[in-house]
Each structure stands twice: as structure tokens, then as C-alpha cells.
Image (cartoon, rainbow, N blue to C red):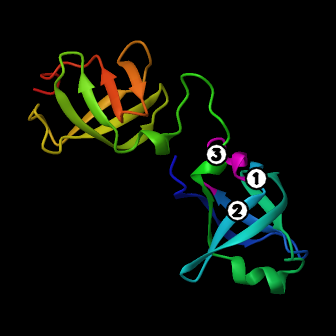
Amino acid sequence: MSDELYVLGKITGFYGVKGWLKLYSYTDPKENIVQYSSLKIKLGKQWQSINLDTGKTHGKGVVAHFSGYDNREIAAVLIGSELAINRSNFKASAKDEYFWADLIDLKVINLQGVILGSVSRLMETSANDVLVIKDIESEAKLADEILIPFVLNHYIERVDLNSGIITVDWPVDWNE
């Protein structure tokens, strides 16, 4: 497993005078950002370790306090900085649940063995998550992008993280 850094959010401003800060969270749900006490913070161009003492949702956002940053003056240097964790620190996912970060760049092949492309990103819709497949040197020669709903045992037949392949029930001529 890679120990690559994954950005979870960033510090956007002050919350009170005792060093608490507002966070913009990229996690879903947004309060998951405060589940990780040992984080990395990007100060300038360098990633450094930082410990999150406590955090909580507040209104529509998330606020947190970091060890050693006990007033506004000290905490000011953190504003605007990104927060990340190492991939090895992700909480374990349940069976048939996947982190989006693990699906990016996986090769997508349909049931007929045709390579459709690879996952460039995912997007959330009100119905379900959607794989965005880029047709990079694909055998299929389809459109620039293919959108496949991430619905297990319907469109998504198998996700094999070890081999880097997602098998889908998706015809080659879907976009034609």
C-alpha cells in the first residue's frame, strides 16, 4: 500500500481567541476530517506533522484545535494551509466499500474484455457516485469521457485493487 499523502481539507480562518480554527473539509461527511489526530500540514512548501487535539462540527462547517497553537497569534501561521494524512492512516473500509483515492487510475474493462480507459476521477450525484473514465489509448475508441454509475452488482461487476482493474457491465457502443 502506498504511503502517499491525501489532502483532507484546509484551514480557512479563526474560530474564537483560544487557537481554534475553521476547517474546510473535503471528506464526506465533512466531520470525518477530525477523526484523524495525527495529520500533516503544508506550511510553505514543506509538509510537517501536526496533532489535532479536538474538533467538531459547528454550523455548516468544522472547527478544530491543534496541539501547541493555543491563541490566535500562534495559530495565525496555519491559516490557508492544507491538511493531509498518509494513505496508511485511512480507516479500514467495509466489504464492497472503496475510497475514491483507491479507484483513481484503475483500468476499466467491460465484460467482453474491451478496455474502456481508466478512472480519472469520481463525482457525486444525488443518486450515486459516478466513475469518470478517460478514453486514453483505449481499444474502445469512444468519446473523451465515459460516465459509469458506481453501482455494485449492476454496472460494477468487480473491483480488484490488487490487479488495478474494475470490471464493468457496460457496452462499448453506449455513447455512440
User: What amino acid type should be assigned to the residue bearing mark 2?
Assistant: Leu
Residue at the extreme bottom of the image, as rendered: 73
Q: Label 2, label 1: how many angstroms apart (C-alpha)?
A: 10 Å
Q: Label 3, label 1: how many angstroms apart (C-alpha)?
A: 12 Å
Residue 90 drawn at (x, y percent):
64, 45
Q: Closer to the observer: label 2 or label 1?
A: 2
Q: Crowdedness of circle 3 by 10 Å Cα count: few (<14), some, many (20+)?
A: few
- Residue at label 3? 90
As helix, strand or loop, the secondary structure at mark 2 comes to strand
Q: Label 2, label 3: how many angstroms apart (C-alpha)?
A: 11 Å
- Is residue 157 within the magenta segment? no
Quarter the C terminus occupies: top left
- Is residue 31 within the magenta segment? yes
Residue at the extreme top of the image, as rendered: 153
The quarter holding residue 166 reads top left
Q: Which mark is residue 34?
A: 1
Q: Crowdedness of circle 2 by 10 Å Cα count: few (<14), some, many (20+)?
A: many
* Mark earlier in primary sequence (2, 3): 2
Magenta stretch bounds: 25-33
User: What amino acid type should be assigned to the residue bearing mark 3?
Assistant: Phe
- Residue at label 2? 39
Q: Closer to the observer: label 3 or label 1?
A: 3
Asked whether the residues under the numbered discs 3 and 1 touch, taking CB atoms below 8 Å apart as contact, a structural biologist would say no
Q: Is residue 51 visible?
A: yes
Q: Is residue 167 above or below residue 72?
A: above
Asked whether the residues under the numbered discs 2 and 3 touch, taking CB atoms below 8 Å apart as contact, a structural biologist would say no
